[in-house]
Image: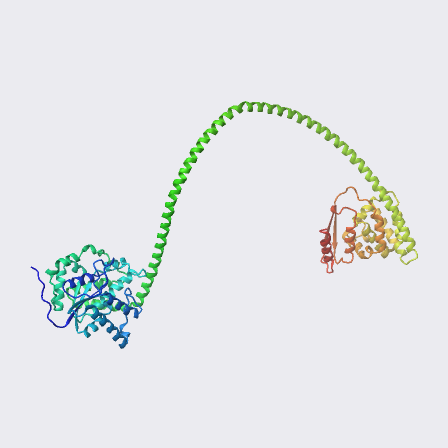
Amino acid sequence: MTHQRPAQAAGRRVALLVLGMHRSGTSALTRIISLAGAGLPRTMIPAGDGNRTGHWESSELVRTNDRIFEAFGLTWSDWQSPDLAAVSFRDRAMMESDLARVIRKEFGPDDMIVVKDPRICRLVPQYLSVFDEMDCRVVPVLAFRHPQEVILSLSARSSWPDDKSALDAALLWLVHTLEAEHETRHLDRIVVSYDRTMRDWRSVVADIEQCGQITLPNGADVIGTAVAEFLNTDERHHNKHGDFFARDTLTMGWVRSVYEAMRLLEADPASPVARAQLDDVRQQINASIPVLLLASNKLVEAQSAKRQAQAELADARQQADEAARQSQDEIAALRQQADDQMQAAQAELADVRQQADEAARQSQDEIAALRQQADDQMQAARAELTNARQQADAAARQSQAELEQGFESEREALSRQYSSALGASEARTQQLLEAKDIVYRSTTSWRVTAPLRSVGRMTKGRWKNTRGLRNAVAVLGGVRPTLAIATRVLRQQGVRGFATRLRQLKANGYQIGNSMPNGNGSSGEYVNLMAAERGDVLFSDWHVALTQAIWDDRPPEPDGATLGLSIVTHNSARWLPGFLTSLAEQNFPLSRLNVAIVDHDSQDNTIDLISAHIAEFGDL
C-alpha cells in the first residue's frame, strides 16, 4: 500500500536549484523532483517542439535572466559569461532585487521549491545571494549529459541561431558545466548524469534527500507510475557515439576532460582529482578566449557560406525540378506533335513517291526523244561551228591584209605630212631669224645673234641630211637646250669657235659623246659645261619666240619609242626652272618620256624646285 510521507518539519525554506546545460536532462530531472513534492513556478513555459513533455521552468524568470544577459550584450546562446565583477554595487543590488521579486512572485510561500533555468549556470553567485537574503537554503542538483548528445540536440533546435557553429555549442556546454560546478563547491550538492536519471531515477531522488538532508513529500512508490509515464525513451533523439572525443580537436580535449571529471563527481561530488582537472580546463579556456573568439567567428563565416551555398543549391535544384516537370509536359506534347507530323509526312511521302514513279515512267519516252533531238542539234551545231570558223578565218585574213595595207598607207601619209610640216617649220624659222637679224643688226648683240643665220642656212638642206643633227638635238634635250648651248658657245668663243665645234660634231656623225671640249674629257663633263649659265638663255625673249616658231606648229610624231632622260644636278637652281618648263612644253607625248634626276648634294634650292614640280605635275 502506498502512502504520502509527512511533510518536512518547519524550518528554513529549501530551494532545489537544478543546474545544467540546455538539452542536458534538466527538464526531466525538474519534473521528477516536482512530482516528489517540490513546488513549481506559477507561470511556466509551455511544452513545444523542442520539449514536448514540458520545460518546467518559469517564463518570468527566463525573461529576467535574458535581460541580465542583454545588459552585457549577450544572449543565451553566447558562450561568453557576463562580467559580473565589473558591475557596480548599486547595479548589482538592483539586479538581485529584481530576481528576488520574480522568485517570490513565481513560487509564493512554498517551503520547498525546485528552480530551473540553464541560464542560471552563469548567474550562480547572484542567485545564491538572493536565496540567502530570502533565508532559503539552496541544494544544488548538477545535471550533465554527454556533450555530443547536447551538441546534436542543440543543432536540431529551431531556436539555435544559424550563425552558431558546433564549436560554439561545445564551448557553451563547457562554460555552463564549469561555472555551475565551480560556484557550488562550498555547498552540499548532488551530481547526476542524464543516463542515470533515465535509467535509475529512484536512486537519484534518494541521493537528493540524503544530500539535502530533506524528506520529499511524495515517495518513489507514490510517484512511480507518473514518472514512468513521463520518462519516455522515445523522446531521446540523440545518442552519443564512441568516436566523438577522437574528433574533439577544436576544443583541444577540454570537452573530454570535463566530461570525465563530471563522471568522477557523480560518484564523489567532492573528488579532488575531478576538481583539479576542471580547474585546469577552466584556466586554459580563460587564457584562450581571444583565440576561441577568432576561431568561432571563422567557423561562423564558413558555416554561413556553407548554408548560403546549400540554400542556393536547394533553390537551383528546386528550379531544375520545376523546369524538369514543365519540360516533361512540353516533351510529351512535342513527342505527340512529332508523331502526328511523322505520320502525316509518311503518308505524304508515299503519295509523292507514287506520283514520282508515275511521272518517271511517263518521262522515259520524253527523255529518249529529247536525247535524240539533242544529239541531232549537237551535230548540226558542230557543222555550223566548223563552217563559221572557216568563214571567220577567211575574214580575219582578209581584214588583216586590209589593215596592213591601210596602216602602210596611213604611215606613208603621216610621213609625208610630217616632212611637209618640218619643211614649213624650217622655212618659218628662217624667216624669224632674218627678222631678228634686221632688229639686232644695229645693236651690240649682233655678234651674238649673227651665227643664227648660219643655223638657218644649215636647215635648208635636205631632211635626210639633218638626221644626225636632229639626233644630237634630241640627245641634248631638245631645241631649247641646244640653242642655249649654242648661244653660250657663241658668247664665249665667237663665231669661229662655234663653227669649229659644229665641224667637229658633223665629222663625228653628230655623236655628242665624241665631241668633247678641247678634244678631251668625259661626256658628263661636257654636259656639265653646256649646262653652265643655261638659265639665262632659256628665259631670253628671242629664245622663247624662236622655239615656239619651230615647235608649236610641228605635229606630234604618230608613233615612237619611249625616251629616257638622266639629269645630274648640283647647285643647279639657276637653270633648272627653264629645263622643267621646256620639258612640260614638248610636243613629244609625256607618257613616253621618262626623266631621272640625280642630285649631287646641292646646297641651293635645287631640291625644293624639283619637289615643287613633282607636287604640281606628278612624278617625273
Q: Is residue 96 left or right of residue 425?
A: left
Q: Is residue 319 visible?
A: yes
Instruction: Find residue 197 and report its horizontal and vertical position in percent.
Output: 16, 60
Residue shown at the point (75%, 52%) measured from the top left: 567
Instruction: Find residue 550 and report its horizontal and vertical position in percent.
Output: 84, 48
Pick the residue in front: 460 or 494.
460
Q: Is residue 61 left or right of residue 434?
A: left
Where 268 sits versus 553, above or below? Answer: below
Task: Name the quadrant containing residue 312.
Answer: bottom left
Instruction: Find residue 553 and report its horizontal and vertical position in percent.
Output: 83, 46
Pick the residue in front: 417 or 602.
417
Residue shown at the point (36%, 55%) measured from the top left: 309
Q: Is residue 267 left or right of residue 71?
A: left
Pick the residue in front: 38 or 244.
38
The residue furthest bottom is 89
Q: Is residue 486 visible?
A: no
- Image quarter in which the N terminus is found: bottom left
Task: Name the quadrant containing residue 252.
Answer: bottom left
Where 135 sits versus 249, above or below? Answer: below
How many labels were placed on the picture? 0
Q: Is residue 529 left or right of residue 301?
A: right
Instruction: Find residue 54 and report its horizontal and vertical position in percent.
Output: 21, 60
Pick the residue in front: 503 or 143.
143
The colour scheme of the drawn protein is: rainbow
Residue shown at the point (36%, 52%) measured from the top left: 315
